[in-house]
Image (tube, rainbow, N blue to C red):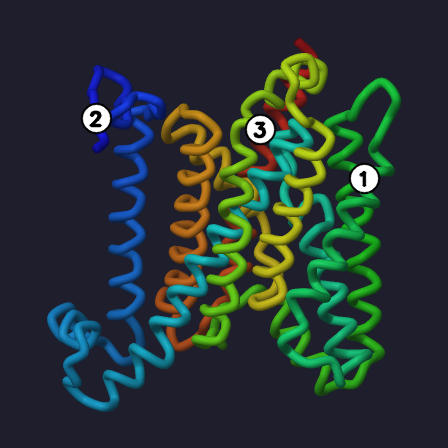
Amino acid sequence: MNTLARSERHWVLRSRTERIALRLPARGIIAIGLLVALQLAILSLSLTLGSYEIDLPTLMATLSGTTVSPAIDNVIWQFRLPRALVAALVGAMMALSGAAMQNVTRNGLADPSLIGISQGAALAVVAAVVVFPQIGHGLRPVIAFGGALGVAALVQALSYQKRGNSTIRFILLGIGVSAFISSITSAMLTYGDIDRAMSALSWLAGSVNAATWGDVHVLTLWCLALTPLILALSRVMSVMRMGEGTAIGLGAPVKWARYGLIAVGVGFAAAATALVGPLGFVGLIAPHAARRIARSGVGIHAILTALCGAVLVSVADLVGRAAFAPIQLPAGLITSIIGVPVFIYLLQRAAAKSHL
């Protein structure tokens, strides 16, 4: 039986034999509860707002299995609920990808959309849509993973120096590789078949408009496969924060942890990008937001980061769908509008610290 001891700032969870004990920051646990409540509130708004408005009692009755009307059942179960769940899952996955890349590079500016990971996945998927249309839709996550992993390895190799990795060098090379990949993607869209190009172009906007239950199932499977890995690597990640030399001195398997984090980060970004398209700056904003909300260990920080990413993309999708109805703006456009000022602020702060 477990017991919970509460102090002013931490909760300590101990097993009956006291062989296992967890020291949990009180502020972090409270923040997790508040973010979960906020996400549920946003989910409720997403299900009720729209061209076909539904009141909360009707929503609760429908979700409990009561058929108020076939039209309401169709709107909620076939359109709004899978869309809301996909937005939350994609946001959490992009956020965890950003957290993994920031930890492995010890660079707070690392983000899948900045260092070319999302662009590599996008190029692979666009090539599959425009050049090789015979490839099935179900293989998109695998193709996206290959493209994202190749770009991540290229940027890491180009930025490597014998005296260590440089933050600015890593970011600049990532931006350059991203621009080069984007130009190839644009060339495919310009000179490819018009119908296939239009299909790929709508996907590149980063929209969850066409989300289905199949997408929910695929994203859930990827989350179930990758989330335990990033939580298992949290102990090594906490040591790696002190520097590679210190981590090696403490006996941490830094080399394999680095490869594992890169693979997990690429996997999260590739799966999310393959299904909804690139979502810019989510992986940049969410880890920093989680750190501002509550200072905690790497494990709790990963959970907070996932929740922040889910809230961010859910809000972006809700705003893009409801604020300018009947026009629907893609969630990727909203996250980019939010993310550009945040990126400029973080870049200026990093530059200021480098001159101290």
Residue at 52 percent across and 32 percent down: it is: 234
Instruction: Estimate how packed mark 3 is, as few (under 14), some (14 to 19) or many (20 or more) residues with alpha carbons within 10 Å.
Output: many
Q: Amino acid at mark 1?
A: Leu
Asked which quadrant contains residue 157, the reply is top right
Q: Are marks 2 and 3 in contact (CB under 8 Å)?
A: no
Quarter that holds the C terminus: top right
User: Which label sits in the foreground, 2 or 3?
Assistant: 2
Label 3 sits on a secondary structure element that is: helix
Residue at 14 percent across and 85 percent down: it is: 68
Residue at 63 percent across and 65 percent down: it is: 274
The residue under label 1 is: 173
Outermost residue, left direction? 57
Q: Is residue 356 left or right of residue 157?
A: left
Residue 29 x/y as whole percent: 29, 33
Q: Are marks 1 and 2 in contact (CB under 8 Å)?
A: no
Q: Which mark is residue 262?
A: none
Q: Is residue 125 left or right of residue 159?
A: left
Q: Earlier in the sequence, mark 3 or mark 1?
A: 1
Outermost residue, top direction? 356
Outermost residue, front direction? 17
Label 1 sits on a secondary structure element that is: helix
The residue under label 2 is: 4
Label 2 sits on a secondary structure element that is: strand
Instruction: Estimate how packed mark 1 is, as few (under 14), some (14 to 19) or many (20 or more) residues with alpha carbons within 10 Å.
Output: some
Nearest the eye: 65 or 233: 233
Residue 129 x/y as whole percent: 73, 78
Quarter that holds the N terminus: top left
Q: Earlier in the sequence, mark 2 or mark 3?
A: 2
User: Against 96, is 299 above or below?
Assistant: above
Q: Which mark is residue 237?
A: 3
Q: Amino acid at mark 3?
A: Met
Q: Amino acid at mark 2?
A: Leu
